Image (tube, rainbow, N blue to C red):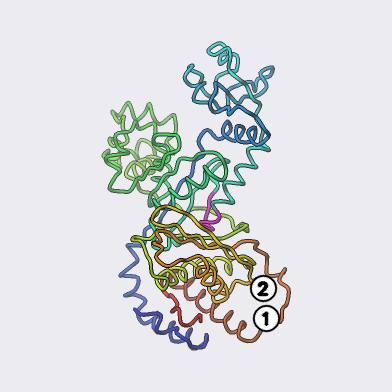
């Protein structure tokens, strides 16, 4: 279906009536063709050794010459009280046999020279929030599963890039910008993403798609299945079920009789079945952006502008959804030789207009691009966001801008009703 021809240079009301009529006419055909193929795109982010890593990063920022991640070190409570147990340990401490949840007294016997640092919830919250704010640049749908874990629903935020590429980008940015490492699970549901992130650590990215379940998940001990209670493990062992694969192949009716509804859940999880949604709360991001690693290097500016439009469309859609306006636009380019350049510019007025932001983005692109450059990644980001209530009236806000706002609203409503990728714009309607 060629949506660009429907929307090109038409009034918002006319667009809405024409497109709604066409969509309703083909609604069943449309959903039949894509409904079963629109799989969720889920990431699970898990901070490696969070409490110790975050303490180490904060100490280095305060001028420490020692990275406690590189020495025998533990995070613990007050050893004069009952809270004196090991909450986190470095890899060096682990080599001495120190275990999480044992007493600090036992840890010191195993390693007399171990360095002990007090837990600090204020520091942990600071770095947890830092991670969350970085992730908000990729999607609005983030579930904070714990202080050091997040689920991300990336389904409508990939811009034809792959989920694995996004995971790699996030991993690199967390390490470079925040100073610690994460494990990332890549999958089509929350369960599999969570299981994948628990594979080998630290600083790893693992996929776990349905076709990989038999190879990667089924050989694991049944005790490693997510949400399997400790009391259930010995009962399963008594049934000669010791691996996740054996649980997946067990009789579901038998499991229901033995464990009730929990038995059905165990069987479904063992088979990779999970339809739960990422439970997110809307929070205002400090910036919104997206980037795409191109399937092949591009040298033509016109093709880069087409991709840039798609990025602007998604970023401005997210801006309007959260009633935010941008005041700054930033463009990033990565060449085939992995050289990164970026350029930013201020907008004349704060806006969420696709047209205004696209024009500024094109201007920045023309300033950056040099003939012969071969581009493998292009990114767009808007910053210094303000709420609509903070907007100052300007001479630049004229009738033409009002028409553009109505058009943006029309397109957004169509995306909300029929799916994000149902409608796209032609470049010539934004000139």
Task: Please determine whether, in this image, residue 278 is positioned above or below residue 119.
Answer: below
Local packing at callout 1 (Cα closer than 10 Å; few below 14, some 14-19, many 20+) is few
Q: CA distance from mark 1 to mark 2?
A: 8 Å
Local packing at callout 2 (Cα closer than 10 Å; few below 14, some 14-19, many 20+) is some
Task: Please determine whether, in this image, residue 82 is positioned above or below residue 290.
Answer: above
Q: Is residue 7 magenta?
A: no
Task: Please determine whether, in this image, residue 366 is positioned above or below residue 127.
Answer: below
Query: Which residue is under mark 2?
Result: 349
Characterize the magenta stretch by its predominant secondary structure.
loop
Residue 265 x/y as whole percent: 39, 43
Magenta-colored span: 136-143
Residue 32 x/y as whole percent: 31, 70
Question: Do tag 1 and tag 2 residues touch (Cβ < 8 Å)?
Answer: yes
Which is more toward the observer, 430 or 265?
A: 430
Residue 133 vs residue 257: left or right?
right
Query: Which residue is under mark 1?
Result: 396
The residue lying at 39 percent from left, 51 percent from top is 164
Q: Is residue 140 magenta?
A: yes
Residue 343 x/y as whole percent: 56, 62
Going from the N terminus, do you reach mark 1 or mark 2 first? 2
């Amino acid at each position: 279906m060629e949506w660009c021809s429907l929307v090109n240079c038409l009034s918002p009301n006319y667009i809405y009536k024409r497109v709604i009529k066409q969509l309703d006419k083909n609604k069943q055909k449309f959903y039949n063709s894509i409904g079963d193929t629109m799989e969720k795109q889920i990431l699970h982010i898990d901070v490696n050794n969070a409490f110790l890593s975050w303490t180490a990063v904060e100490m280095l920022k305060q001028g420490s010459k020692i990275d406690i991640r590189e020495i025998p070190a533990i995070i613990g409570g007050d050893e004069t009280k009952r809270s004196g147990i090991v909450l986190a340990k470095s890899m060096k401490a682990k080599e001495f046999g120190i275990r999480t949840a044992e007493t600090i007294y036992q840890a010191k016997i195993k390693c007399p020279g171990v360095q002990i640092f007090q837990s600090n919830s204020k520091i942990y919250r600071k770095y947890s929030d830092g991670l969350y704010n970085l992730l908000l640049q990729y999607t609005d749908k983030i579930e904070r599963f714990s202080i050091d874990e997040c689920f991300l629903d990336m389904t409508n935020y990939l811009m034809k890039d792959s989920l694995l590429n996004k995971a790699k980008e996030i991993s690199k940015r967390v390490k470079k910008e925040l100073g610690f490492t994460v494990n990332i699970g890549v999958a089509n549901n929350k369960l599999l993403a969570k299981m994948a992130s628990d594979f080998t650590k630290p600083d790893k990215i693992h996929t776990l798609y349905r076709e990989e379940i038999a190879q990667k998940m089924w050989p694991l001990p049944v005790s490693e299945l997510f949400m399997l209670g400790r009391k259930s493990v010995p009962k399963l062992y008594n049934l000669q079920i010791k691996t996740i694969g054996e649980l997946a192949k067990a009789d579901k009716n038998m499991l229901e009789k033995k464990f009730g509804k929990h038995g059905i859940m165990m069987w479904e999880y063992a088979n990779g079945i999970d339809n739960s949604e990422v439970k997110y709360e809307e929070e205002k991001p400090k910036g919104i952006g997206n980037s795409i690693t191109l399937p092949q290097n591009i040298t033509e500016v016109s093709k880069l502008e087409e991709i840039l439009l798609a990025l602007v469309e998604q970023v401005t859609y997210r801006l309007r959804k959260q009633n935010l306006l941008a005041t700054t636009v930033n463009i990033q380019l990565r060449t085939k030789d992995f050289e990164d350049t970026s350029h930013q510019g201020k907008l004349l007025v704060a806006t969420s207009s696709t047209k205004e932001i696209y024009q500024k983005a094109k201007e920045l692109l023309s300033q950056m691009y040099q003939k012969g450059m071969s581009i493998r990644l292009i990114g767009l980001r808007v910053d210094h966001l303000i709420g609509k209530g903070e907007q100052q009236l300007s001479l630049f806000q004229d009738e033409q801008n009002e028409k553009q706002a109505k058009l943006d609203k029309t397109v957004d409503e169509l995306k909300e009703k029929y799916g994000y990728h149902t409608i796209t714009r032609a470049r010539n309607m934004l000139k």
